[in-house]
Amino acid sequence: MGHSGLATGGSVCCVREGALVRVTLSHPGKLNAMSRAMWRELRDVFLALQADATLRCVVIGGAQGHFCAGGDISEYQEFRFEEVTLRHFHENEVWGGLQAMLDCDVPVIAQIEGNCMGAGVEIVCCCDLRVATDTARFGAPIGRLGFPMAPREMALLLREAGVATLREMLLEAAVLTAPQLHARGFLQKLVPEALLVSEVAQHVQRVSRLAPQAARLNKQTLRALLASADQAPVPLLARAYAYADSDEHHEGVAAFLAKRPADFSLPKT
């Protein structure tokens, strides 16, 4: 089983090992930042995994020592400043990938190391078990880029990471350590870097030796019980992307691309 995207836009690759599939986020030189193509690939990959009745476990991780550093900001000027295209990005491309993960009945284990920011945090929130190195770093510092988190994505993080952690990530652009998130219950297991692969392998063994039908039914029941927590109010969704052409949005993205501090000072009166 294999899947890859354009080399210039990163890729989401699959390797089958018996009843296990390893999914790898890869975007060389960008710490596996998610491009638009990668979001679409993530959706296609997990739709295919959901349709495969022979699978018992999925492990998702990143290449080159990092999980995922967020979104590919180099693409943002192409679509973020128009409300229609911004809405399509979040509601169709990003949420399409995340929803496909959430809908997957096969147990999914996140293998986390290095940077796990923004999009990376959202992806691991869709996983059933999270194993991280003790040096992994987590955050969603999009306030530095001049834009908020999309409502569906925020509902997902609120449910999985909790309101206190979400407030730190969004309102302070806090970067939290793996030990902090392990103590808060977000991570099930914390290990030294050298033990990450072997620890994940043990989780795969424990999952794979159990009844696969029971695992799928358990995930379906959990999904039904948690469904209300993932629903953003319709009125909120209607106005969620009206900030697209705002000065702060333009300034935050432009500053990042120019490698300078953003200037969010209040307009002079």
Image (cartoon, rainbow, N blue to C red):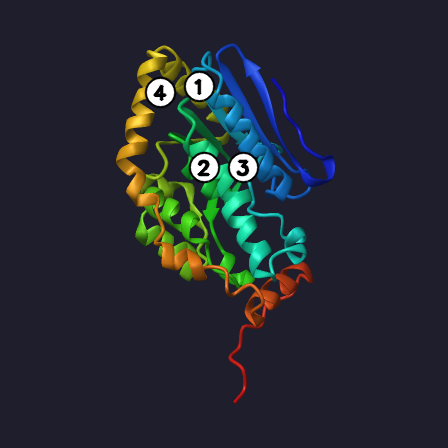
Provide the residue designation for mark 3. Answer: 67
Residue at the spot 38% in from the left edge and 59% down from the top edge: 236
Q: Crowdedness of circle 1 by 10 Å Cα count: few (<14), some, many (20+)?
A: many
Residue at the spot 53% in from the left edge and 39% down from the top edge: 114
Task: Please say if 122 is above or below 42.
Answer: below
Q: CA distance from mark 4 to mark 2?
A: 16 Å
Task: Please say if 127 is above or below 140.
Answer: above
Q: CA distance from mark 4 to mark 1?
A: 10 Å
Q: Is residue 136 visible?
A: no
Residue at the spot 66% in from the left edge and 58% down from the top edge: 77
Provide the residue designation for mark 4. Answer: 216
Q: Nearer the viewer, residue 188 or 241?
A: 241
Which percent across, then down, holds residue 3? 63, 25
Residue at the spot 54% in from the left edge and 33% down from the top edge: 43
Give the label, 3 or 2, closer to the camera.
Answer: 2
> Which amino acid type is shown beneath numbered disc 1?
Cys
Task: Describe the element under mark 1 as helix, strand or loop.
Answer: strand
Task: Describe the element under mark 4 as helix, strand or loop.
Answer: helix
Q: Earlier in the sequence, mark 4 or mark 3?
A: 3
Q: Earlier in the sequence, mark 4 or mark 1?
A: 1
Provide the residue designation for mark 1. Answer: 57
